[in-house]
Structures are given as C-alpha cells and as structure tokens.
Image: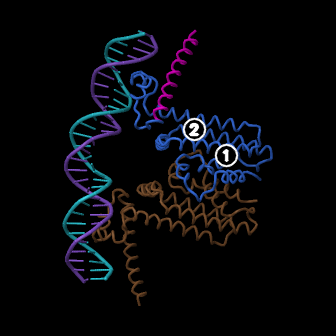
Chain colours: A blue, B brown, C cyan, D purple
Amino acid sequence: MSELVDTGIDAARQENVTRILDSAERLFRHYGYSKTNVADIARDLEMSPANIYRFFASKTEIHQALCARMLAASYGQALETSRLPLSASERLRRYAQGQHKMTVETMLDEQKVHEMVVVAIERDWHVIEKHIDRMDGILADIIREGIAAGEFADQDPEKAARCFGASIVTLCHPQIVAQCLAKENRATPDELIEFAIRALKK
Amino acid sequence: MSELVDTGIDAARQENVTRILDSAERLFRHYGYSKTNVADIARDLEMSPANIYRFFASKTEIHQALCARMLAASYGQALETSRLPLSASERLRRYAQGQHKMTVETMLDEQKVHEMVVVAIERDWHVIEKHIDRMDGILADIIREGIAAGEFADQDPEKAARCFGASIVTLCHPQIVAQCLAKENRATPDELIEFAIRALKK
DNA sequence: CGAGTGACGATTTTCAAATTTCGTCATTTT
DNA sequence: AAAATGACGAAATTTGAAAATCGTCACTCG
C-alpha cells in the first residue's frame, strides 16, 4: 500500500515539477532568463513564490532542470536516428544533420534562448558534460556497428566517437553556431559531415 | 626627392604606431583591456592623449591593430611550418600542434588576454575573418601538394582546407579551448589531429 | 607646414543608496 | 500531516548623480 501512496505522491510531485518547468520555459523564452524571477513563475501558476521552493532549491536549479530536459530531447532524437535501419555512415550523417538543425533552430528561433545557453556554459554544468558523454556513447555505438559491418576501418570506437564529435563541434556548439551562421567563407555543414565520415572509413 | 621625404615620414609614422602598439600590448596584458585607457598609454609613452589620435582613430582601432599583429605572428609561424621539407601529413600535424600550442599559451598565460579575445570575437571583426581566410589558404597549399604527391585523395583543396580547419576548431578557437582545457572526457589534441588527417587520405 | 598639445563637450563608467529578488521559516490552510 | 503561504533577512540588481574617459578642435611649437 505504501507503494501506491508513494506513487501517488511522486506523481503529484512530478506533475508540479513539470508545470513549473513548462511555465519557466515559456517565461524564459518570452522575457529572457534574467528578466524572469521566481515570483513571475509563481504568479503564472497562481501559487506563492515560497511554494516553488518545495520543488526546486533555487532558480538556478530550475534553469538546470530545464537544460537537462532540452538536452534530453536532443538525446532522444539522436538515439532514434542511431536505431534507423540504415548504414552506419548514413546514420552518422543524419545524426550530425539533426544536431545541427536542432542547434540552429534553438539558437536562431529566440534571442532569449541564447542567454540561457551562455549562462549554462559559463557555469560549466555537470548537465552538459553528462550530455556530451551520452551523445558520444551513441556515436560510439554507431561506429562500432560500422566497424563490424566492414564499413569503417578497425579502430577504438570510443576514441573515434570523441574525435567525430569534436570535429563537427562547429555544427552543434551553440556559441560557435551563432558566431558562424552569417559567415561566408566556411565549409558547409554537409561538406564537414562528409569530411568527418571519411576519416572513419578505411 | 618627394619619395625620400615620404619614406622618411612613413617610417616615422610606423615607428610611432609600433611604439603605441607595444605600450598598449604591455598595459593591456598587465591591467586588462577595459582597465587601460588611452591616457595611460599616452602617459607610458610620455606624450599627450590627443597625440595618440593622430595615429589611431579610436581605442578600438588600437585593439584591432594589436589583434592583427598577434594574428600575423600566428600566420607567420603557420607559414613557416608549411614550408618545411616534410610530407604534407607531417606539416599538417605540426601546423595543428603549433596552432593549439599557441592558443593554449596565449589563453592560459594571462587571464587578461582572454578579455581581449572575447571583445574581438564579440565585435566580429573583419581582422579575424581575414586571418581565417589566410590560414585556410596555407592549409589549401599543403593539401594541394599532398594531393600532387599522391599522399591524399584527389579533392578540392580549398574545400578540404575549410573542412580540416573546421574539424580542428576545438584546438584553435580561444573560447572553446578555454572551455575544454579542464575537461576529462575529450579527445586529445593528437587524436583529433590524426583523425582529421585521415579524412584527407585516400 | 606638420608634429604635438591643452582644453572641452559628449559619452561611459563608477559607486553608493534605494529597490528588487532570493530563499528561509514559522504559521496557516486543507 | 502534507500542502501552501506571508513575512522577513540576506544578497543581488537597479538607479541616478558624480567622476572618468573618449575623442575633437583650435592652437602652439619647432
């Protein structure tokens, strides 16, 4: 029985956590991260500011959870791509294209989102490190299968994944993407992706 | 005769420009870019602030010229490397290692230098674009020779150069280098360099 | 006549006071 | 007893007036 009760409590908690994050995301996107305070979020949800603190220890923690949720979406898409019934090369291609598309859309869509990203990177959050590790894990899996299939040269999949990820960083790193978007004299995303895939082949 | 006079005038101008840049570099490095004003530079050179403006239209222009000078040094080193009597692969390797070393040293050496870099990137200066173009030119030359020597696959050298440069951006871009220096779970510089070189081979 | 300067208005930056926001806690509500 | 709140001190942010800095210009000096 305690399980049922606990589940109920946890579900209610989760419900509140989600509502707070939804509200925070909406307000951060609209007014910007620094211009939104917890009182604004509380008002939006018709609860008291103090109540927010029953679910998040700080405004920072809200931001952190929001980042995690966005990165999880990115991870989800990457994982889906990695399981398509395609050659390893083609999956890497789509992985990189998908990451680039998502980064561009997230960055360009809203000026306000950029603020959140800068804050996240500055504070050097664990969340981002975790994300990179997981993404490299996906890449390593694809590359491992590509090696097994004779598509790629024999090599350490983990190391290759880190190199592949690093070499397409200009497509995925929000700050760099923002810096390079307007530039002329640059390799196109597709050119760079083909380049990186070629490095894996034998 | 006017030529002789002109040369003399230009030389004197150049002398002053150099002295101002030397002083500015020293002060910027020691006190930081924003903490140094043109009066400080003038005092250091025992001239009036107004006189500085006979050589540079603004403090910004001094910063810009200083950036150009530093990037020219980087270019010079790269050009030297590119002309060594070595295989194309080895020259690319040393090029990338050299650029990384220079970036790390410049960034880590002084906290104050980082401020100058951030300002330069934020203002999105032409100077930096020019530098990237020149550096890609060097890379293209090496790659072209590598293709001719049968060391690399047949491909468009300019395109390959842009891709090579982009894929090792984590080693050369000051902001990213600063972000990744402490990180554990990353490809090492040498791993990444070998990866990028492999992409050029046939 | 060109190199160099002091004085000055316009713009930025600084700094401290006033205000806002953060996060805690005792208390109330359900 | 758990959920929610109002009130409050600590910390951060805004504000605006004072000070510093930027960049110009009429002028002097060699």
Mark 2, secondary structure of its residue:
helix
Position above or below: A19 against B65: above
Residue placed most toward the observer, B64 or A134: B64
Chain bearing mark 2: A
Please state if B129 lies on the left or on the right of A187 as rendered.
left
Q: Is residue B36 left or right of residue B150?
A: left
Q: Which mark is residue A161?
A: 1
Outermost residue on the bottom side: it is B1
**In the rendered structure, which amino acid carries the disc numbered 1?**
Ala
| Residue in the picture at 61% in, 66% down | B137
**Magenta stretch: residue A20 in it?**
yes
**Residue B131, how many percent across, how many down?**
53, 64
Identify the amino acid type marked 2. Answer: Lys
Taking the spot 63% from the left edge, 47% from the top edge, the residue there is: A165
Viewer-proximal residue, A46 or B149? A46
Residue topped by disc 2: A130
Q: Residue A93, labelled with which disc?
A: none
Quarter of the image for residue A70 reads top right
Cα separation, mark 1 vs mark 2, equals 15 Å
Asked whether A139 falls inside the magenta stretch, the response is no
Q: Main secondary structure of the magenta part?
A: helix
A60 sits to left or right of B143: left
Element at badge 1? Answer: helix
Give the crowd class for mark 1: few <14, some 14-19, many >=20 residues within 10 Å: many
**Placement of the N terminus of chain A among the 4 image quadrants:** top right
State which tag comes first along the sequence, 1 or 2: 2
Q: Which residues are magenta?
A: A1-28
Q: Is residue A134 above or below residue D9?
A: below
